[in-house]
Image (cartoon, coloured by chain):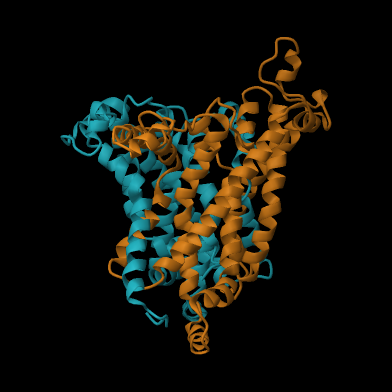
Amino acid sequence: MATVTQHSRFGNYFWPVLAWAVALIFFFPIFWMVFTSFKTDADAVKPENLFVFTPTLENYVNMTKDYDYWRFATNSVITSTFATLFALVVGVPAAYAMAFDPSRHTKDVLLWMLSTKMLPAAAVLYPMTFLTKNFLEVFDTHFLVIIVLCLINLPIVIWMLFTYFKEIPKEIIEAGKMDGVSTWGEIKDILIPLAWGGIASTALLTFIFCWNEAYWTVRLTTIDAATLSKLIEGNRAPEGLFFGRLSAVSTAAVAPIIILGWFCQKQLVQGLTFGAVK
Amino acid sequence: MSNRSLPRLLQTPAVVLLLLWMLVPLSMTLYFSFIRYVLNSTRRPEWMTPSLSNWRGLGNYEYVLFKTKDFWFAIQNSLLIVGSILILTVVLGLAIAVLINRSFPGRGIVRVLLISPFFVMPAVNAVLWINMILDPVLGLNGLAVAGLNNIIDGLQTFPVIGQFFAMWPDLEPISFRATQTSAYAVIMMVTWQWTPFAVLIFMTSLQSEDESQKEAATLDGANAWSKFRNLTVPHLARPIAIVVMIQSIFHLSLYAEIEIVSRGNGNKNLPYLIGEFTSNNIGAASATGIFAVILANIVAIFLLRMVGKSLMD
């Protein structure tokens, strides 16, 4: 590292050790959840079994019986996947047009799109319930959850894609135009192969956001389309009775996403700050 | 098809979808906020269907602002929660970003461990903290306090120093399920989740810092603190502003954590209050919703302006 600091012998050991300590403290709650998931419900609340216990997989084995885990997990997978796909299908052409054929309104359109993301969801809670329950009759359907997840993430999808597409030299796309390639051909044969990495990380990040969403998925579902957020929310107060099994189901709910998240740290910065921090 | 209309056509689905998503529910909220509209009323059944003949003007706003104590409490509590989280995440985020912005063994693993809390879904975050960690009896909070009491009890049997420890009272674990303490619990869990976000952004920004400037300062005899104060902090001003604004917008609409930690114990913020009103008084819920929109917009305007500047370069 290029930083020129007077590295004292003390500092050489102290700062790395401190960094490790901080990281372990931050990771501790997650570790504790995973750790507790291998205890029986009885062991989980006994102080004498705090660290020493016989590990068991029974909480994971019983997850289907106790919580109907797979049903909620399937709903989470279905809604997050299709919302992500749908957002890309709508977002890629839009971002393509904005990046390669900008008008003087493009900037305003982009900013306006972002502003929709900043509206507090709670403000439209009743209208959404009313519309979807009484009027459109789509309350508690996969269709509704997919559409809502897609819409709340669409601004970020378009933003991220836009910043990736801007990096591609315009000449490449224009060369395609000269050769008489259709717009669809340009997107399919030139843009998508070139921006594949950017599109993939946009998709990954969108999937994570969809999976973790906890307002609409809880409020607009009851049973049929309920996701993992709803499952956990419904078991919020076990009063210490079920710490073991609750830890297991929580671990199963977050583990896939934490691991996915490790792979898109860099994109996260761009996706969350709308490209404003480089 | 002319060359100009095609790009517009490609943007149309996105624009139309977002326009509908924004305008339809929001205009309904606006409409409901001006009429009397309740879900259950045996005395005034005509208020149960939304209609212009139930026009109430600014009555709902007046009711929310002046006739309920909840609104001001919710605003105050929202600001307490958001403000505390902002201060904690920015301070911790800066400290940690500077701490790991150097090479040391296992830096990659440290980064991975640090970022992990950010990907935990809010519902799991809240359930995990309030039960397994903060519960005054069965959580680590309760176990730690009980352990401390045991140690003190043990020390009391020693000669001489036992006299000193005999004067100590038994420690009581804090319960995080009361109104005010559950706000602190929310602050703790959200800070845990969002500090990694601040760290990530500050680190990205630190890596783009001009190293030659720092080296020059070192040659001029500047110490580490004055370099941090005079070079790094100004460089970080913009990312700090971004972190503050993005978090404000997210945390002003904090919901899952409050719902899980403090259902029914009186701790509420604006979105939670809207949820409570929605169980019957839609007029009041809508008026409160409009206030929430205004509050979010105050922050959003500054954020958008800042983002807009860096957009086209």
In the rendered image of this protein, which colour is used for chain A?
A: cyan
| Residue at the image position 59 percent from the left and 57 percent from the top | B244
Q: Position of residue A35 (x, y in %)?
A: 26, 41
**Position in image of residue B281 (x %, y %):** 69, 24
Residue A254: image location, x then y, percent? 35, 44
Give left or right: position of B115 versus A114: left
- Give the mark count: 0
Residue B303 in sight in this render: yes
Name the quarter where the N terminus of chain B is drawn: bottom right
Residue B269, above or below B3: above
- Identify the image quadrant of residue B107: bottom left
Residue A226 appears anywhere in the view: no
**Residue drawn at (27%, 37%) of the image:** A36
**Left or right of A68: which side holds B7?**
right
Chain letter matching colour orange: B
Residue ID at (32%, 76%): A9
In the visual, does B296 lie left or right of B87? Answer: right
* x, y percent for residue A141: 46, 33
Image height check: is A203 above or below B76? below
A1 vs B101: above or below: below
Which residue lies most toward the left here? A54
Residue placed farthest to the front in the image?
B160
Between A96 and A13, the residue placed more toward the observer is: A13
**Is A162 displayed left or right of A256 in the figure?**
right
* Front residue of this view, candidates B191 and B224: B224
Most foreground residue, A79 or B126? B126
Quarter of the image where the C terminus of chain B is located? bottom right
